[in-house]
Amino acid sequence: MPLTATDDIIGPAYARNRGVGAFNVVQLEHAEAIVDGAHRANLPVILQISENTVRYHGSLAPIGRAALALAEQATVPVAVHLDHAESEDLVHEAVRLGFTSVMFDASKLPYGQNIAATRAVTEYGHRADVLVEAELGEVGGKDGAHAPGVRTDPAEAREFAAATAVDCLAVAVGSSHAMATRDAVLDFGLIARLRSAAGVPLVLHGSSGVSDADLARAVSAGMTKVNVSTHLNAIFSATVRRELHRQPAVSDSRTYLGPAREEVAAEVARLLNVLAGV
């Protein structure tokens, strides 16, 4: 099927108060597993490529084009999204490649500069019919930053969304990036207030640290797009370790990457059903 626009996945989910899974691609096997998981669940999914992953690969185009090709071959809706981009040049490249959404992260800038930079990216994205996500309130955990207790203010969220014209807003409600345990404590009341105030779909970053029950509760409270990365990476890595321990003399990487891909696909399918309330 043709590449699905991110808005065609997020829009209906927002209207129905359901969750959408957005999973980060690190290598080709991750992208294949995520799309496979979406097929198993028969639910839409968003493939995300972060600026950190672009640095790992050395450029966006090869891994980006691979993700776009997988999305175009899928028989369920699959969108391709640029995650946590701090570079406007990278945003422009993603749009030129055909990504249907971008997340521009200017949250480290002072509030006024965040608004100005984000507004410029939003205007650029909208000219290309690309959905733009931004961040207000430090989520924490990325690049050593950690801000326990920081939360997004609903009044500020309303002002920010109006001033920047963003389509989605990532907010700080208690989760943190790169958590290895699923024990984050979310503020569900704040999520509900933010949904009402912002007027755009909310995005939960750092969802790897959130339990299944709290992911479902966060969606019920008002979250729409739910980002997961570390949790899947942990499953992938644990499977590789298990297979290498089982077959220490193996030299064919398919022997251990294949099972890792399978485990991630199964978990993606399971999480998509959790978020959809199935």
Image: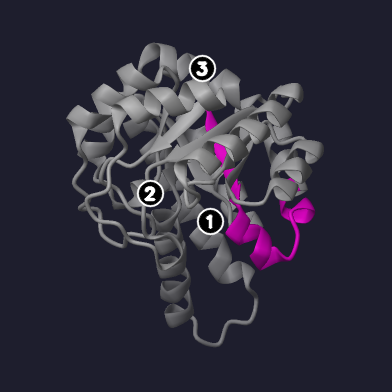
Q: Is residue 172 above or below residue 142?
A: above
**In the image, residue 105 above or below residue 56:** above
Question: Residue 44 in magenta?
Answer: yes
Residue 269 location, x and y as percent?
Answer: 43, 38
**Residue under circle 2?**
138
Amino acid type, label 1:
Arg
> Given the image, on which type of amino acid does mark 2 rest?
Glu
Q: Residue at x 65, y 55 (%)?
A: 28
Ranked by sequence position, the earlier of labels 3 and 2 is: 3
Q: Is residue 166 visible?
A: no
Between marks 3 and 2 in the image, the one whose residue lies nearer the viewer? 2
Q: Residue 246 location in percent, x, y?
A: 43, 79
Quarter of the figure with residue 53: bottom right
Residue in front for this viewpoint, 176 or 238: 176
What element does badge 3 sit on?
A: helix
Callout 3 amino acid: Gly
Quadrant into which the C terminus falls? top left
Task: Of the two numbered discs 3 and 1 on the same chain, state the one appearing first in sequence.
Answer: 3
Can you tell which of label 1 and label 2 is closer to the viewer? 2
